């Protein structure tokens, strides 16, 4: 099974890259795509999502065991249903915090997507609106702490500027 991690700051273009990779994949087994936006357990959940990827997706897949991820219901503010992952299909995980040292050790390819801060903030706010604007500083502080701790750009196999 092929495992691809795509990381980078909010608004850098990770989701678009992941969708293009999935949609243009050559072969019968179209990749499963997991968006960390569906996994984060709220605005303070960047680290928790990366840990869930490691514990419930990557470690089991590499051990030949069933793997899954749990969706977070942003409206209800609580964990929701679990989603099984077919181990016979490639896996793409995209989102802020996907590329940790422990996750990188279990992945075949790690991609870092980047753009300048002004562009990425404008993209993120255009995409998610006023609700994200209110939380921008809170999220960005987590993001910057994650980058200092994990140094994900240095873990990447390739860097994609957008």
Image: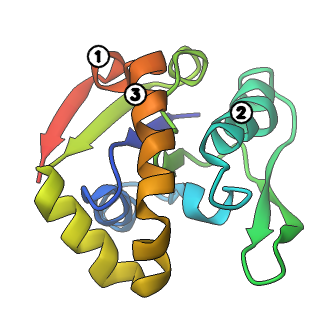
Question: Quick one: label 1, few (<14), some, or many (20+) residues within 10 Å?
Answer: some
Q: Counting residues from the N terminus, which is met first, the one under dot 3 or under dot 2?
A: 2
Which residue is painted at 75% across and 24% down in the image?
Answer: 59
Q: Is residue 86 visible?
A: yes
Q: Does residue 14 sit above or below 6 in this rendering?
A: below
Q: Which residue is mark 3?
A: 147
Left or right placement of residue 57 versus residue 129 in this view: right
Across and down, in percent, residue 14 comes to 33, 55
Label 3 or label 1, whichever lies nearer to me, is 3
Across and down, in percent, residue 120 comes to 21, 60
Label 3 or label 2, whichever lies nearer to me, is 3
Which residue is painted at 41% across and 49% down in the image?
Answer: 140
Q: Counting residues from the N terminus, which is met first, the one under dot 1 or under dot 2?
A: 2
Image disc number at residue 154: 1
Left or right placement of residue 113 versus residue 102 in this view: left
Q: Which residue is mark 2?
A: 51
Which residue is painted at 24% across and 64% down in the image?
Answer: 121
């Amino acid at each position: 099974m092929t495992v691809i991690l795509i990381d980078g700051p909010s608004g850098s273009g990770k989701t678009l890259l992941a969708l293009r990779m999935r949609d243009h994949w050559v072969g019968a087994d179209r990749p499963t795509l997991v968006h960390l936006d569906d996994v984060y357990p709220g605005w303070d959940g960047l680290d928790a999502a990366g840990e869930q990827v490691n514990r419930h997706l990557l470690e089991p897949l590499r051990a030949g065991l069933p793997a899954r991820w749990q969706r977070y219901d942003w409206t209800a503010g609580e964990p929701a249903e679990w989603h099984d992952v077919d181990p016979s299909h490639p896996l793409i995980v995209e989102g802020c915090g996907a590329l940790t040292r422990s996750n990188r050790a279990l992945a075949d390819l790690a991609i870092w997507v980047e753009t300048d801060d002004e562009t990425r903030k404008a993209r993120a706010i255009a995409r998610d609106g006023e609700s994200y604007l209110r939380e921008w500083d809170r999220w960005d502080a987590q993001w910057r702490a994650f980058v200092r701790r994990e140094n994900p750009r240095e873990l990447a196999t390739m860097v994609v500027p957008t």
